[in-house]
Image (cartoon, grey):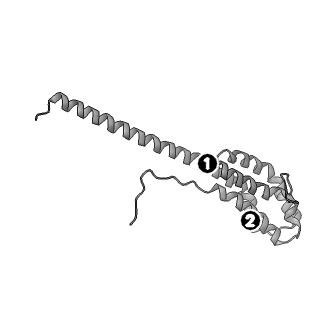
Amino acid sequence: MTISQLTLVYVSVGATLAGTLIGGYIAHRLSLEKMAHDIRSEANRKLRTAFSEELAILQRQRMSGVEIIRLLDSAFLKHQIAVNEFRSHLAEGELIAFNNAWVKYHGYQEGGEVHDIQFFEKYSFHNNKADQDKASKDIKALLEFAKPPVINPIIRSKRT
């Protein structure tokens, strides 16, 4: 059985087109993953940056309850803007947990009811280091959502 030159040309062109299409699809998927990673990384960076100064001050300086309130009140608008921008990058389940952490940081609960208002006085009840640590802990809980995203590789190696 002999293969004609014309058949060989058709097979070669078909294989080239198939390889090109498969390669293009893989490159497209990888570029979409990279773009999503970069967008989320930038959103994470903006959220961490918005809270970094206040977190550093809470961690390094001994403050009275009044000073804690003043610090957090003065930065609240900056924090709210960063939180609003960051929310659009979260999946529904993450968004619910993030919103709960946000309200825990700046709001308060009373009788099982959550009040989404600016209430930093809760960090000055004892007027000691524990209040400062609680504020730091609540900020860190928010920043847990701003960890770098993980890219799922297309091909996963199996370890045996």
Examine the rendered structure and indicate whether residue 156 appears above or below residue 123. Answer: above
Amino acid under disc 2: Lys
Mark 2 highlights which residue? 137
Furthest-front residue in view?
A: 1
Image coordinates of residue 28 in percent, x first then y, are 45, 40
Kindly report the distance in space between the C-alpha atoms of the residues bearing marks 1 and 2.
Answer: 23 Å
Residue nearest the viewer, comparing 78 with 145: 145
Residue at x 84%, y 64% (from the top left corner): 123
Task: Determine which quarter of the picture holds residue 138.
Answer: bottom right
- Which residue is found at the position 70% from the left and 45% from the top? 85
Q: Residue at x 86, y 63 (%)?
A: 122
- Name the spot of residue 50 as percent of width and height, x first: 71, 53
The percent coordinates of residue 94 (x first, y second) are 66, 52
Location of the N terminus (image quadrant): top left
Q: Amino acid at mark 1?
A: Glu
Q: Residue furthest top?
A: 6
Quarter where residue 73 is shown: bottom right
Where is residue 9 drawn, in percent x and y? Answer: 21, 30
Left or right of 96 on screen, residue 126: right
In this orientation, which residue lies closer to the viewer: 74 or 83?
83
* Label 1, residues with CA under 10 Å away: few <14, some 14-19, many ≥20: some
Above-or-below relation of 137 to 13:
below
Identify the disc placed on residue 42.
1
